[in-house]
Amino acid sequence: MNKVPKKRNWLLISLILVLVLIAIFAVFKAKSTPKGKAITVAVAESRTIKETVSASGKIFPETEVKISSDVSGEIVELYIQEGDSVVVGQVLAKINPDAYLSAVERGEASLNGSKSQLAVSKSQIESNKAQREQILAQVENAKTINKRNEQLKKDGVISQAELDQSLSTLRQLEANLRSSDASIKSAQQNAQASDFSIRGAQASLKELKTSLNKTTIKSPTSGIVSKLSVEKGERVVGTIQMTGTEMMRISNLNAMEVQVDVSENDVLKVVVGDDVDIDVDAYLGKKFKGKVTQIANSASNISSGSQASALNTDQVTNFVVKIKVLEDSYHDIKTSGMKYPLRPGMSASVDIFTEEVKDVTAVPIQCVTVREKDFEKKKKHSKVKKDETSPENDKTEEKEFDEVIFVMDADTVKMIKVETGIQDDEFIAIKSGIKVGDKIISGPYNEVSKSLKPGDKVRIKEEKEENSKD
Protein backbone atom coordinates (compact mmCIF):
# COMPACT_ATOMS: atom_id res chain seq x y z
CA MET A 1 0.00 0.00 0.00
CA ASN A 2 2.94 2.43 0.58
CA LYS A 3 4.62 1.78 -2.77
CA VAL A 4 2.23 3.89 -4.85
CA PRO A 5 2.58 7.13 -2.81
CA LYS A 6 6.37 6.74 -2.88
CA LYS A 7 6.38 6.52 -6.68
CA ARG A 8 4.18 9.59 -6.88
CA ASN A 9 6.55 11.50 -4.61
CA TRP A 10 9.56 10.60 -6.79
CA LEU A 11 7.76 11.73 -9.91
CA LEU A 12 6.83 15.03 -8.33
CA ILE A 13 10.40 15.61 -7.14
CA SER A 14 11.78 14.80 -10.63
CA LEU A 15 9.34 17.21 -12.28
CA ILE A 16 10.32 20.00 -9.90
CA LEU A 17 14.03 19.38 -10.56
CA VAL A 18 13.44 19.58 -14.33
CA LEU A 19 11.55 22.85 -13.97
CA VAL A 20 14.33 24.29 -11.81
CA LEU A 21 16.97 23.29 -14.37
CA ILE A 22 14.95 24.88 -17.20
CA ALA A 23 14.58 28.08 -15.23
CA ILE A 24 18.34 28.18 -14.47
CA PHE A 25 19.15 27.58 -18.18
CA ALA A 26 16.74 30.33 -19.28
CA VAL A 27 18.28 32.82 -16.83
CA PHE A 28 21.81 31.90 -17.95
CA LYS A 29 20.90 32.22 -21.64
CA ALA A 30 19.20 35.57 -21.08
CA LYS A 31 22.35 36.88 -19.36
CA SER A 32 24.65 35.54 -22.07
CA THR A 33 22.55 36.78 -25.04
CA PRO A 34 24.05 40.01 -26.44
CA LYS A 35 21.80 43.05 -26.30
CA GLY A 36 21.00 45.40 -29.17
CA LYS A 37 20.40 45.04 -32.91
CA ALA A 38 23.08 43.15 -34.79
CA ILE A 39 24.63 45.42 -37.44
CA THR A 40 27.66 45.59 -39.72
CA VAL A 41 29.94 48.60 -39.95
CA ALA A 42 32.18 50.21 -42.54
CA VAL A 43 34.85 52.86 -42.07
CA ALA A 44 34.70 56.17 -43.96
CA GLU A 45 37.85 56.51 -46.01
CA SER A 46 39.47 58.85 -48.52
CA ARG A 47 39.03 57.61 -52.09
CA THR A 48 39.05 58.65 -55.73
CA ILE A 49 35.57 58.29 -57.19
CA LYS A 50 34.78 58.22 -60.88
CA GLU A 51 31.13 58.81 -61.75
CA THR A 52 30.01 56.67 -64.68
CA VAL A 53 27.07 56.52 -67.09
CA SER A 54 26.39 53.03 -68.37
CA ALA A 55 24.76 52.26 -71.72
CA SER A 56 24.69 49.63 -74.44
CA GLY A 57 24.63 49.70 -78.21
CA LYS A 58 26.29 48.49 -81.40
CA ILE A 59 29.61 48.94 -83.17
CA PHE A 60 29.66 50.87 -86.46
CA PRO A 61 32.38 52.14 -88.76
CA GLU A 62 33.09 55.84 -88.33
CA THR A 63 32.86 56.16 -92.12
CA GLU A 64 30.28 54.04 -93.94
CA VAL A 65 29.11 54.94 -97.46
CA LYS A 66 25.90 53.50 -98.87
CA ILE A 67 26.14 53.17 -102.65
CA SER A 68 23.07 53.29 -104.88
CA SER A 69 22.78 53.64 -108.64
CA ASP A 70 21.65 57.00 -110.04
CA VAL A 71 20.19 55.26 -113.09
CA SER A 72 17.85 52.30 -113.44
CA GLY A 73 18.66 49.13 -115.31
CA GLU A 74 20.10 45.64 -115.18
CA ILE A 75 23.46 44.91 -113.57
CA VAL A 76 25.55 43.43 -116.39
CA GLU A 77 28.89 43.37 -114.56
CA LEU A 78 29.79 43.04 -110.86
CA TYR A 79 33.49 43.30 -110.19
CA ILE A 80 33.66 42.95 -106.38
CA GLN A 81 32.59 40.62 -103.59
CA GLU A 82 31.73 41.28 -99.97
CA GLY A 83 34.90 41.75 -97.92
CA ASP A 84 37.00 43.06 -100.83
CA SER A 85 39.21 46.11 -100.37
CA VAL A 86 38.53 48.98 -102.78
CA VAL A 87 40.11 52.37 -103.50
CA VAL A 88 38.68 55.69 -104.66
CA GLY A 89 37.63 55.59 -108.32
CA GLN A 90 37.71 51.79 -108.63
CA VAL A 91 34.98 50.37 -110.93
CA LEU A 92 32.57 48.30 -108.84
CA ALA A 93 29.73 47.41 -111.23
CA LYS A 94 28.10 48.28 -114.56
CA ILE A 95 24.46 48.92 -115.44
CA ASN A 96 23.28 47.99 -118.97
CA PRO A 97 24.20 51.15 -121.01
CA ASP A 98 22.33 50.39 -124.29
CA ALA A 99 19.32 52.65 -123.64
CA TYR A 100 21.60 55.48 -122.52
CA LEU A 101 23.87 55.07 -125.57
CA SER A 102 20.83 55.50 -127.83
CA ALA A 103 19.77 58.57 -125.88
CA VAL A 104 23.26 60.06 -126.31
CA GLU A 105 23.12 59.43 -130.08
CA ARG A 106 19.73 61.16 -130.27
CA GLY A 107 21.15 64.06 -128.31
CA GLU A 108 24.12 64.35 -130.66
CA ALA A 109 21.78 64.30 -133.66
CA SER A 110 19.62 67.01 -132.10
CA LEU A 111 22.72 69.12 -131.45
CA ASN A 112 23.93 68.72 -135.03
CA GLY A 113 20.47 69.71 -136.29
CA SER A 114 20.56 72.87 -134.20
CA LYS A 115 24.03 73.69 -135.48
CA SER A 116 22.84 73.18 -139.07
CA GLN A 117 19.89 75.49 -138.46
CA LEU A 118 22.28 78.13 -137.12
CA ALA A 119 24.41 77.83 -140.26
CA VAL A 120 21.32 78.28 -142.43
CA SER A 121 20.30 81.35 -140.41
CA LYS A 122 23.75 82.88 -140.76
CA SER A 123 23.74 82.21 -144.52
CA GLN A 124 20.33 83.86 -144.81
CA ILE A 125 21.65 86.90 -142.95
CA GLU A 126 24.53 87.24 -145.41
CA SER A 127 22.17 86.85 -148.39
CA ASN A 128 19.79 89.49 -147.01
CA LYS A 129 22.67 91.86 -146.40
CA ALA A 130 23.87 91.48 -150.01
CA GLN A 131 20.35 92.00 -151.27
CA ARG A 132 20.06 95.11 -149.11
CA GLU A 133 23.26 96.54 -150.60
CA GLN A 134 21.85 95.96 -154.12
CA ILE A 135 18.57 97.65 -153.23
CA LEU A 136 20.45 100.49 -151.57
CA ALA A 137 22.39 101.08 -154.81
CA GLN A 138 19.12 101.10 -156.76
CA VAL A 139 17.64 103.60 -154.31
CA GLU A 140 20.61 105.93 -154.76
CA ASN A 141 20.27 105.67 -158.56
CA ALA A 142 16.51 106.29 -158.38
CA LYS A 143 17.10 109.39 -156.25
CA THR A 144 19.53 110.74 -158.83
CA ILE A 145 17.08 110.10 -161.71
CA ASN A 146 14.19 111.61 -159.81
CA LYS A 147 16.23 114.73 -159.00
CA ARG A 148 17.24 115.11 -162.65
CA ASN A 149 13.63 114.67 -163.78
CA GLU A 150 12.51 117.38 -161.39
CA GLN A 151 14.92 119.79 -163.10
CA LEU A 152 13.83 118.61 -166.54
CA LYS A 153 10.20 119.15 -165.62
CA LYS A 154 10.99 122.69 -164.55
CA ASP A 155 12.72 123.22 -167.92
CA GLY A 156 9.69 121.73 -169.70
CA VAL A 157 11.65 118.92 -171.25
CA ILE A 158 9.59 116.04 -169.77
CA SER A 159 6.00 115.68 -168.78
CA GLN A 160 4.52 115.41 -165.29
CA ALA A 161 3.78 111.70 -165.91
CA GLU A 162 7.45 110.91 -166.44
CA LEU A 163 8.33 112.75 -163.21
CA ASP A 164 5.65 110.83 -161.32
CA GLN A 165 6.98 107.55 -162.73
CA SER A 166 10.53 108.22 -161.45
CA LEU A 167 9.19 109.26 -158.04
CA SER A 168 7.08 106.07 -157.81
CA THR A 169 10.12 103.96 -158.67
CA LEU A 170 12.09 105.70 -155.88
CA ARG A 171 9.34 105.07 -153.31
CA GLN A 172 9.11 101.38 -154.29
CA LEU A 173 12.87 100.89 -153.94
CA GLU A 174 12.84 102.59 -150.50
CA ALA A 175 10.07 100.20 -149.43
CA ASN A 176 12.14 97.26 -150.69
CA LEU A 177 15.08 98.58 -148.63
CA ARG A 178 12.96 98.64 -145.47
CA SER A 179 11.72 95.10 -146.20
CA SER A 180 15.32 93.96 -146.65
CA ASP A 181 16.23 95.46 -143.25
CA ALA A 182 13.32 93.56 -141.68
CA SER A 183 14.45 90.34 -143.37
CA ILE A 184 17.96 90.80 -142.01
CA LYS A 185 16.60 91.38 -138.49
CA SER A 186 14.37 88.29 -138.76
CA ALA A 187 17.31 86.19 -139.95
CA GLN A 188 19.41 87.46 -137.04
CA GLN A 189 16.66 86.49 -134.57
CA ASN A 190 16.46 83.05 -136.21
CA ALA A 191 20.21 82.72 -135.78
CA GLN A 192 19.90 83.70 -132.12
CA ALA A 193 17.11 81.14 -131.64
CA SER A 194 19.31 78.52 -133.29
CA ASP A 195 22.12 79.47 -130.91
CA PHE A 196 19.78 78.93 -127.95
CA SER A 197 18.72 75.60 -129.41
CA ILE A 198 22.36 74.59 -129.65
CA ARG A 199 22.91 75.47 -126.00
CA GLY A 200 19.84 73.48 -124.97
CA ALA A 201 20.93 70.53 -127.09
CA GLN A 202 24.42 70.71 -125.58
CA ALA A 203 23.00 70.73 -122.05
CA SER A 204 20.72 67.77 -122.86
CA LEU A 205 23.61 65.91 -124.44
CA LYS A 206 25.79 66.61 -121.38
CA GLU A 207 23.01 65.26 -119.11
CA LEU A 208 22.61 62.16 -121.28
CA LYS A 209 26.36 61.55 -121.27
CA THR A 210 26.36 61.97 -117.47
CA SER A 211 23.61 59.33 -117.21
CA LEU A 212 25.64 57.10 -119.53
CA ASN A 213 28.72 57.56 -117.35
CA LYS A 214 26.66 56.71 -114.26
CA THR A 215 26.00 53.26 -115.65
CA THR A 216 29.55 52.61 -114.47
CA ILE A 217 29.49 52.48 -110.64
CA LYS A 218 32.75 53.72 -109.12
CA SER A 219 33.88 53.75 -105.50
CA PRO A 220 33.62 57.21 -103.89
CA THR A 221 35.95 56.24 -101.03
CA SER A 222 38.54 53.69 -99.98
CA GLY A 223 37.64 50.87 -97.61
CA ILE A 224 36.11 47.42 -97.33
CA VAL A 225 32.90 46.21 -99.00
CA SER A 226 31.10 45.51 -95.72
CA LYS A 227 27.76 44.69 -97.33
CA LEU A 228 26.79 43.59 -100.86
CA SER A 229 23.04 43.59 -101.48
CA VAL A 230 22.82 42.77 -105.22
CA GLU A 231 23.89 40.11 -107.69
CA LYS A 232 24.77 40.22 -111.37
CA GLY A 233 21.59 40.19 -113.45
CA GLU A 234 19.42 42.02 -110.91
CA ARG A 235 17.59 45.22 -111.81
CA VAL A 236 18.10 48.33 -109.73
CA VAL A 237 16.01 51.50 -109.40
CA GLY A 238 17.86 54.78 -109.83
CA THR A 239 17.82 57.47 -107.16
CA ILE A 240 16.99 60.13 -109.77
CA GLN A 241 13.40 58.84 -109.88
CA MET A 242 12.78 57.76 -106.26
CA THR A 243 14.48 56.12 -103.31
CA GLY A 244 16.98 53.97 -105.13
CA THR A 245 18.16 50.43 -104.58
CA GLU A 246 21.03 50.18 -102.10
CA MET A 247 23.66 48.11 -103.87
CA MET A 248 26.47 47.94 -101.33
CA ARG A 249 28.22 49.60 -98.40
CA ILE A 250 31.86 50.56 -98.19
CA SER A 251 33.27 51.01 -94.69
CA ASN A 252 36.56 52.05 -93.18
CA LEU A 253 37.06 49.22 -90.67
CA ASN A 254 40.27 50.79 -89.36
CA ALA A 255 38.25 53.45 -87.52
CA MET A 256 35.32 52.09 -85.50
CA GLU A 257 32.84 53.68 -83.11
CA VAL A 258 30.19 52.56 -80.66
CA GLN A 259 26.74 54.13 -80.86
CA VAL A 260 24.79 53.83 -77.60
CA ASP A 261 21.44 55.06 -76.29
CA VAL A 262 21.78 57.23 -73.18
CA SER A 263 18.67 58.22 -71.22
CA GLU A 264 17.63 61.84 -70.86
CA ASN A 265 18.50 61.73 -67.15
CA ASP A 266 22.14 60.85 -67.85
CA VAL A 267 22.89 62.52 -71.18
CA LEU A 268 23.38 65.95 -69.56
CA LYS A 269 26.33 64.54 -67.59
CA VAL A 270 28.12 63.40 -70.75
CA VAL A 271 30.43 65.79 -72.64
CA VAL A 272 32.54 65.34 -75.74
CA GLY A 273 35.99 64.03 -74.81
CA ASP A 274 34.91 61.89 -71.83
CA ASP A 275 36.92 58.68 -71.38
CA VAL A 276 35.04 55.43 -71.90
CA ASP A 277 35.55 51.76 -71.02
CA ILE A 278 34.03 49.48 -73.66
CA ASP A 279 33.04 45.82 -73.25
CA VAL A 280 32.45 43.96 -76.51
CA ASP A 281 30.39 40.79 -76.14
CA ALA A 282 32.62 38.96 -78.62
CA TYR A 283 35.72 39.58 -76.46
CA LEU A 284 35.01 38.36 -72.94
CA GLY A 285 37.28 39.93 -70.32
CA LYS A 286 38.78 42.40 -72.80
CA LYS A 287 38.49 46.12 -72.05
CA PHE A 288 38.60 48.55 -74.96
CA LYS A 289 39.18 52.26 -74.50
CA GLY A 290 37.32 55.07 -76.19
CA LYS A 291 36.37 58.74 -76.17
CA VAL A 292 33.01 60.45 -76.66
CA THR A 293 33.04 62.20 -80.05
CA GLN A 294 29.42 63.23 -80.61
CA ILE A 295 26.20 63.70 -78.61
CA ALA A 296 22.87 63.86 -80.43
CA ASN A 297 20.83 67.04 -80.06
CA SER A 298 17.51 65.28 -80.65
CA ALA A 299 16.10 62.14 -79.09
CA SER A 300 16.53 59.00 -81.15
CA ASN A 301 12.96 57.77 -80.63
CA ILE A 302 11.16 60.96 -81.72
CA SER A 303 9.84 60.82 -85.28
CA SER A 304 9.92 64.14 -87.07
CA GLY A 305 6.87 63.16 -89.12
CA SER A 306 4.55 62.49 -86.19
CA GLN A 307 3.91 65.19 -83.62
CA ALA A 308 1.63 62.88 -81.63
CA SER A 309 4.38 60.34 -81.09
CA ALA A 310 6.82 63.13 -80.19
CA LEU A 311 4.49 64.26 -77.39
CA ASN A 312 4.02 60.77 -75.96
CA THR A 313 5.66 60.74 -72.52
CA ASP A 314 5.11 57.02 -71.86
CA GLN A 315 8.14 55.89 -73.83
CA VAL A 316 11.72 56.24 -72.62
CA THR A 317 13.58 59.15 -74.19
CA ASN A 318 17.11 58.28 -75.30
CA PHE A 319 19.87 60.19 -77.07
CA VAL A 320 22.49 58.60 -79.32
CA VAL A 321 26.07 59.09 -78.13
CA LYS A 322 28.95 58.19 -80.47
CA ILE A 323 32.18 56.86 -78.96
CA LYS A 324 35.39 56.42 -80.94
CA VAL A 325 37.18 53.15 -80.15
CA LEU A 326 40.88 53.94 -79.67
CA GLU A 327 42.99 51.73 -81.92
CA ASP A 328 45.72 51.40 -79.28
CA SER A 329 43.32 49.41 -77.09
CA TYR A 330 43.04 46.58 -79.64
CA HIS A 331 46.42 46.86 -81.35
CA ASP A 332 47.50 43.62 -79.66
CA ILE A 333 44.62 41.76 -81.34
CA LYS A 334 45.59 43.15 -84.76
CA THR A 335 49.20 42.11 -84.33
CA SER A 336 48.07 38.57 -83.52
CA GLY A 337 46.81 38.16 -87.09
CA MET A 338 43.24 39.51 -87.02
CA LYS A 339 43.24 42.50 -89.38
CA TYR A 340 39.79 43.78 -88.43
CA PRO A 341 38.94 42.64 -84.88
CA LEU A 342 35.84 44.84 -84.60
CA ARG A 343 33.02 44.21 -87.05
CA PRO A 344 29.92 46.33 -87.76
CA GLY A 345 26.92 45.18 -85.73
CA MET A 346 28.79 43.71 -82.75
CA SER A 347 27.09 44.32 -79.40
CA ALA A 348 28.89 46.44 -76.84
CA SER A 349 28.28 48.01 -73.43
CA VAL A 350 30.09 51.10 -72.20
CA ASP A 351 30.92 52.94 -68.99
CA ILE A 352 31.34 56.67 -69.65
CA PHE A 353 33.42 58.42 -66.98
CA THR A 354 31.63 61.73 -66.62
CA GLU A 355 33.38 63.13 -63.51
CA GLU A 356 36.30 62.28 -61.24
CA VAL A 357 36.92 63.49 -57.69
CA LYS A 358 40.17 62.66 -55.87
CA ASP A 359 40.79 62.36 -52.12
CA VAL A 360 37.15 62.66 -51.11
CA THR A 361 35.53 61.14 -48.01
CA ALA A 362 33.56 58.14 -49.22
CA VAL A 363 31.38 55.38 -47.78
CA PRO A 364 29.66 52.36 -49.32
CA ILE A 365 26.45 53.32 -51.11
CA GLN A 366 24.26 51.17 -48.83
CA CYS A 367 25.30 53.29 -45.83
CA VAL A 368 23.34 56.31 -47.07
CA THR A 369 19.59 56.31 -46.60
CA VAL A 370 16.77 58.85 -46.22
CA ARG A 371 14.50 59.89 -43.38
CA GLU A 372 11.53 62.23 -43.42
CA LYS A 373 12.21 65.70 -42.06
CA ASP A 374 10.95 66.17 -38.49
CA PHE A 375 9.27 69.51 -39.11
CA GLU A 376 7.21 67.98 -41.89
CA LYS A 377 5.85 65.36 -39.49
CA LYS A 378 4.95 68.04 -36.95
CA LYS A 379 3.31 70.14 -39.64
CA LYS A 380 1.22 67.23 -40.83
CA HIS A 381 0.28 66.23 -37.25
CA SER A 382 -0.88 69.77 -36.35
CA LYS A 383 -2.89 70.05 -39.54
CA VAL A 384 -4.81 66.85 -38.86
CA LYS A 385 -5.63 68.07 -35.33
CA LYS A 386 -6.94 71.42 -36.56
CA ASP A 387 -9.27 70.00 -39.20
CA GLU A 388 -9.85 66.28 -38.92
CA THR A 389 -12.99 66.45 -41.06
CA SER A 390 -11.39 68.35 -43.95
CA PRO A 391 -11.48 66.43 -47.27
CA GLU A 392 -7.97 67.69 -47.97
CA ASN A 393 -6.70 65.23 -45.35
CA ASP A 394 -7.51 62.43 -47.79
CA LYS A 395 -4.88 63.70 -50.20
CA THR A 396 -1.31 62.45 -49.90
CA GLU A 397 0.95 65.32 -48.89
CA GLU A 398 4.31 65.73 -50.49
CA LYS A 399 7.04 64.66 -48.11
CA GLU A 400 10.56 66.03 -47.85
CA PHE A 401 13.50 63.85 -46.93
CA ASP A 402 17.04 64.25 -45.64
CA GLU A 403 19.95 62.07 -46.64
CA VAL A 404 21.35 60.56 -43.47
CA ILE A 405 24.04 58.18 -42.21
CA PHE A 406 23.95 56.17 -38.97
CA VAL A 407 27.16 56.26 -36.94
CA MET A 408 28.04 54.03 -33.96
CA ASP A 409 28.32 56.01 -30.75
CA ALA A 410 29.54 53.44 -28.18
CA ASP A 411 26.68 50.91 -28.18
CA THR A 412 24.00 53.26 -29.57
CA VAL A 413 23.07 54.78 -32.93
CA LYS A 414 23.61 58.39 -33.89
CA MET A 415 21.89 59.75 -37.02
CA ILE A 416 23.84 62.39 -38.98
CA LYS A 417 22.46 64.44 -41.87
CA VAL A 418 24.93 64.43 -44.78
CA GLU A 419 25.43 66.07 -48.17
CA THR A 420 26.34 63.57 -50.87
CA GLY A 421 28.27 64.00 -54.09
CA ILE A 422 29.09 61.77 -57.05
CA GLN A 423 29.14 57.99 -56.81
CA ASP A 424 30.43 54.95 -58.64
CA ASP A 425 29.21 51.36 -58.51
CA GLU A 426 30.24 50.84 -54.86
CA PHE A 427 31.01 54.13 -53.09
CA ILE A 428 29.43 57.55 -52.73
CA ALA A 429 31.20 60.80 -51.87
CA ILE A 430 30.22 62.62 -48.66
CA LYS A 431 30.71 66.39 -48.84
CA SER A 432 29.77 67.14 -45.24
CA GLY A 433 28.58 65.45 -42.06
CA ILE A 434 31.31 62.86 -41.38
CA LYS A 435 35.07 62.56 -41.56
CA VAL A 436 37.59 59.90 -42.52
CA GLY A 437 37.77 57.13 -39.91
CA ASP A 438 34.18 57.32 -38.66
CA LYS A 439 32.46 53.95 -38.17
CA ILE A 440 29.37 53.91 -40.35
CA ILE A 441 26.56 51.36 -40.07
CA SER A 442 26.35 49.53 -43.40
CA GLY A 443 23.81 46.77 -42.77
CA PRO A 444 21.59 44.92 -42.68
CA TYR A 445 19.82 46.78 -45.47
CA ASN A 446 16.36 46.61 -43.89
CA GLU A 447 17.69 48.07 -40.61
CA VAL A 448 19.54 50.93 -42.32
CA SER A 449 16.78 51.82 -44.78
CA LYS A 450 13.74 51.48 -42.47
CA SER A 451 14.16 50.41 -38.85
CA LEU A 452 17.12 52.21 -37.23
CA LYS A 453 16.39 55.28 -35.14
CA PRO A 454 18.69 57.57 -33.20
CA GLY A 455 19.46 56.09 -29.76
CA ASP A 456 18.81 52.45 -30.70
CA LYS A 457 21.03 49.88 -28.98
CA VAL A 458 23.29 48.12 -31.45
CA ARG A 459 26.12 45.65 -31.52
CA ILE A 460 28.48 44.51 -34.24
CA LYS A 461 27.31 41.28 -35.80
CA GLU A 462 29.67 38.36 -35.17
CA GLU A 463 30.80 36.00 -37.88
CA LYS A 464 28.92 33.10 -36.25
CA GLU A 465 25.65 34.95 -36.64
CA GLU A 466 26.36 35.76 -40.27
CA ASN A 467 27.27 32.14 -40.99
CA SER A 468 24.16 30.83 -39.26
CA LYS A 469 21.97 33.12 -41.38
CA ASP A 470 23.78 32.04 -44.53
Image: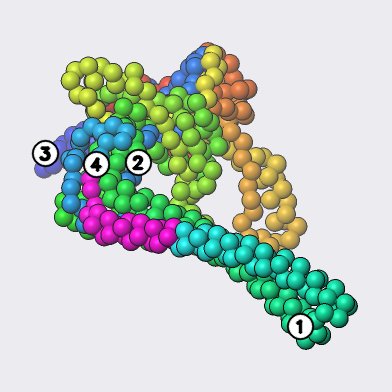
Q: Quadrant of residue 390?
A: bottom right
Q: Nearer the viewer, residue 72 or 400?
A: 72
Q: Nearer the viewer, residue 92 or 121?
A: 121
Residue, disc 4: 92
Q: Nearer the viewer, residue 122 or 393?
A: 122
- Specify the amino acid type for callout 3: Lys
Which residue corresponds to the image point at 20% horizontal and 36% vertical from the top-left?
83
Residue, disc 2: 65
First of labels 1, 4 by sequence position:
4
The alpha-carbon separation of the residues under discs 3 and 4 comes to 119 Å
Q: Position of residue 346 (x, y in %)?
A: 27, 37
Q: Tell me the mark number nearer the camera, choosing from 3 and 1.
A: 1
Magenta segment, prevailing SS (helix, strand or loop): helix
Q: Report the number of discs.
A: 4
Residue density around tag 3, few if under 14, some if 14–19, many if 20 or more, within 10 Å: few
Residue, disc 3: 3
Residue, disc 1: 162
Q: Position of residue 130 (x, y in %)?
A: 58, 61
